[in-house]
Image (tube, rainbow, N blue to C red):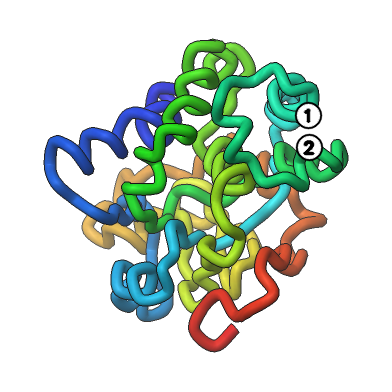
Amino acid sequence: GYMHMCRLFTSQAFPYLQHELGYDYVLRMDDDNVPRTDVGDLFEVLHSKGAVYGYPAELPEWHRETAMTLGMWLQDKVFSGRGGAYLEQVNPVYFRNQTALQELAQNIFFTNFFVTKLGFWSEPHVLEFLGEVDGSGMAYKHRWGDAPLHHAVLGLFADSCSVLDLCHVDYKHGSTGHVIEGCALKRVERRRWDDEINPECRHGGRQAGAAGAAQGRKGGEWFSRADVPRCAGPTSEGS
C-alpha cells in the first residue's frame, strides 16, 4: 500500500489531475497534518514567482537502501550517460560532479505536504525519466518513495530558483509526530496524535506509529539541521 501511494504521487496522479480534470496546480496536505501557522494562498505564491514546486523541509533520506540504490541508478543513467533523451535536459552539474549526483539521492523533500505546478510534471523529458523509473521496478524492490523521487526529479530538471522553500508554514505530521518549523524537522511529539487532529477520538484513538517513532530517533541528529540553500536569491516570503 505504501509503495502504491508513492507511485501515485510521483507518476500517476499528476497527468490525471492536469489532463482529465483540468487543474494547473495541486496541493497535497495529508489529512493527519496539523498546520500551526497560516498557510496562505500557496497557489498564488507559486504563480507569482513562476515556480514549479514548494516544499516544507529538505532532509536526509533515512532509509539507507533507498539512498544507496537510487544513487547508483542515477549514476548509471546520468553520469554514465545510459539514460534516454531526457539527458539533454539534465542540469549540467550532474554530468561533471558524481558527488553532487550521489547527494541528490541522499536527501528528500517532505512530501506529506507540498504544492506544485502540474505542467512541470508533464514535460516530455520528465515523463520519460519517470517512465524509466517506473519501468525499472526499483521503487517496489528498494522502496523508492515519492519524497526522494521528487527531490531527484526537481534537482535534475528544475531551475533551482523555481523550487521554493515554504519556511513560513509550520505543521505537525500527526502519524509520525514530526514537527516542521522554519523548514527544519525540530522534534518528534509522540503523544496521541488523534487528540490533536480529531478531539472526538480521544478514547480509542491510535497511538503514534512505531515506524515513525523509529525514524524520528534514527534521524535525531538532523532535527536542527538548517535547510540546504538551493538558490542565490530569496525563495520564499521573508527568507
Examine the image and state in which quarter residue 6 appears.
top left
Residue 70, percent across and down? 69, 26
Contact (CB < 8 A) between labels 1 and 2?
A: yes
Examine the image and state in which quarter residue 218 appears.
top right
Q: What element carries label 1?
A: helix
**Identity of the residue furthest to the left in this view:** 21
| Mark pair 1, 2: CA separation | 5 Å
Which residue is found at the position 41% from the left and 33% from the top? 124
As rendered, which of 72 and 196 lies closer to the eye? 72
Taking the image as shown, residue 224 lies to the left or right of residue 127, namely right
As rendered, which of 134 and 140 lies closer to the eye? 134
Asked if 192 appears above or below 66 in the picture, the reply is: below
Name which residue type carries label 1: Phe
Q: How crowded is mark 2: few (under 14 residues within 10 Å), some or many (20 or more)?
A: some
Give residue 79's mark: 1
Residue 122, percent across and down? 35, 38
Name which residue type carries label 2: Phe
Residue 156, percent across and down? 62, 43
Which residue is found at the position 32% from the left and 78% from the top? 40
- Name the quarter where the N terminus is drawn: top left
Which residue is found at the position 52% from the left and 27% from the top? 129
Q: Residues within 10 Å of mark 1 (few under 14, many from 20)?
A: some
Q: Is mark 2 on a helix, strand or loop?
A: helix
Residue 167, percent across and down? 54, 74
Q: Is there any visible trace of residue 218 in the rendered image?
A: no
Taking the image as shown, residue 149 lies to the left or right of residue 101, namely left
Q: Which comes sooner in the sequence, label 1 or label 2?
A: 1
As rendered, which of 221 and 20 lies closer to the eye? 20
Q: Which residue is disc 2 drawn over?
A: 95
